[in-house]
Each structure stands twice: as structure tokens, then as C-alpha cells.
Amino acid sequence: MTTVPPPLPYRVADTRAETADTRSIELVPAGRELPPFAPGQFAMIYAFGVGEAPISASALRGRHGGLVHTVRAVGAVSTALYRLRPGDAVGLGGPYGTGWNLDAAAGHDVLVIAGGIGLAPLRPVVHAVLDRPAAYGRLTVLVGARTPADLLYRDEIESWRGPARVEVTADRPGPGWEGSVGVVTTLLNRLDLRPERTCALVCGPEVMMRQTARDLLVRGLAPHRVQVSLERNMRCATGHCGHCQLGPLLLCRDGPVVGYDRVADLLLVREL
């Protein structure tokens, strides 16, 4: 039986409101530090007295040198984390799961496709590629949000333009919105893809990832060149409890990031 180490004490160094219900929190160790995280891996964050939640890192090094997670307030634990302020304490465990396979993307064009909060686990990928531009080909970032008010990291996204091609769309535009309108997959029509040398990394609602992957395959990408980050009900983070099972995969251990070639058929199965 795999033994889960106890969480380590961390404190909140900084917070930043991203949208009306979403906040980024930077955590620094209050003692011993966890091993380094890779882009795409997740932590178990313990809100004392409330519970724990698995949340992917949205930046590997924040302004204070800490680990950043972006939290949307949708339940008791995530709401407690959303309400954290500098100086507050949490427990942190990890890193858990598989990360984005950037080694496979080396020397290739990198296509990042994010829907909604799915931009958070992909943000460290953008940072990594921008930090080592000579190691990769062209970087393209496609971002979709439900409304303009739901768009994460708005200022930072603008800073990516130039080094990367960035396209943003909103499903339901509001007053003053001058960007694209529609789901994120519609942005693929604007691209001059080189499928034989492109690696695509996709995260968002499951229906969005399924459709995006299919559209990429139609455009000539091989299934193993498409990576997706899947979400199930993760509890133990070690593959022991089985709550996150998807076919033969235990996503806390074998995921959350997996090649589309491994999960194309499994994504037809709805989560119970």
C-alpha cells in the first residue's frame, strides 16, 4: 500500500483576483519545501478545518518565489481557498501526477489551447516555452472564455503577444468586446498548422477537449501529438482509492496529462 506523506505547512505570500470568483494564491514554505513541480502536475491543498482539493500549479515561481495556484470558488474547499489572504496557513502535498511532456514538444511548434479555467494548468507551459524559445518552434496560444469577464490573466496574455501568436475568443461577448466570438475551436480555422511538426496541449471542459482533439486530428495531427489534461474525482492522489479511475487509468497517478492516443475512446465515457 502506498503511504501518502502528510502535507507540509505553507503560508500565503500573495493573492491576486483574476475574475469575480477566481483568485491566484502564491504559497511559500513555512518550513520544509516540497520537491519541484513540473508544468501540469497538481498539489493537494488542505484548507484547515474544511478539507482538501487537488489543484494544478498555475505558475512554478511567483513574485515571492513560491508556487502559484489559481482557484475558482465552486465548493466548500475551493471557496475557503479563494478567501485566503497573505499570512494565512494551508497544508500542501505533492507534486502529484504527470505533467505536460515538453520533451516531446522540443523542436516542434507548440499549440496551447485552453478553455476557461483550463488556462491555469497550461500557463506554466507558456512560461517554459517563452523562457527557452530556441528549444521550440512557433508558439501559438488559443484561449476561450465564457464571457470577457471570465478571462484569466488578461494583462499577462497581452504580454505574450509578439513572442507568441495569441488568439482569444468569448462565447458570450459583452459591451465593448472587440475580440472574437465563439467557442475556442473556431480559432483553429485561422491557423496555418504544420501538423507533422506540431504538438498540441489542450485543457478545458471535457466536451471542449474532445471536440478540439477531433478537430486537430482532422487537420492532420497524429493522436500522440495531442496531450490533454483530464479531471476526475481525485482523493488520495496515489492511485489507491480508485475514485479517479477512467478505464485502465488512475488519473491521479497516470494523469492528469495523457496523450490523446491513450484516451480517445475513454473520453466517450461520462464521469459518474
Image: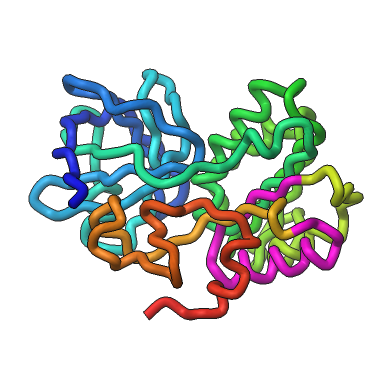
Asked where in the image residue 78 lies, by quadrant, the reply is bottom left
Judge whether residue 115 is colored magenta: no
On the question of residue 100 being in view, the answer is yes
Does residue 16 appear left or right of residue 130 in this picture? left
As drawn, 169 above or below 40: below
Does residue 153 appear left or right of residue 135 in this picture? left
Q: How is the image coloured?
A: rainbow
- Residue shown at 44% from the left, 53% from the top: 254
Q: Position of residue 100 (x, y in %)?
A: 56, 42
Does residue 200 appear left or right of residue 149 in this picture? right
As drawn, 245 above or below 16: below
Does residue 86 appear left or right of residue 55 in this picture? left
- Residue shown at 33% from the left, 26% from the top: 35
Q: Position of residue 135 (x, y in %)?
A: 73, 24
Judge whether residue 211 is colored magenta: yes
As drawn, 117 above or below 174: above
On the question of residue 149 being in view, the answer is no
Asked where in the image residue 231 lies, by quadrant, the reply is bottom left
As drawn, 51 above or below 86: below
- Name the quarter where the C terminus is drawn: bottom left
Residue closer to the observer: 109 or 76: 109
Q: Position of residue 106 (x, y in %)?
A: 71, 32
- Residue shown at 45% from the left, 29% from the top: 60
- Residue shown at 39% from the left, 19% from the top: 65
Residue closer to the observer: 132 or 143: 132
Q: Position of residue 80 (x, y in %)?
A: 22, 51
Write down the region rendered in magenta: 199-222
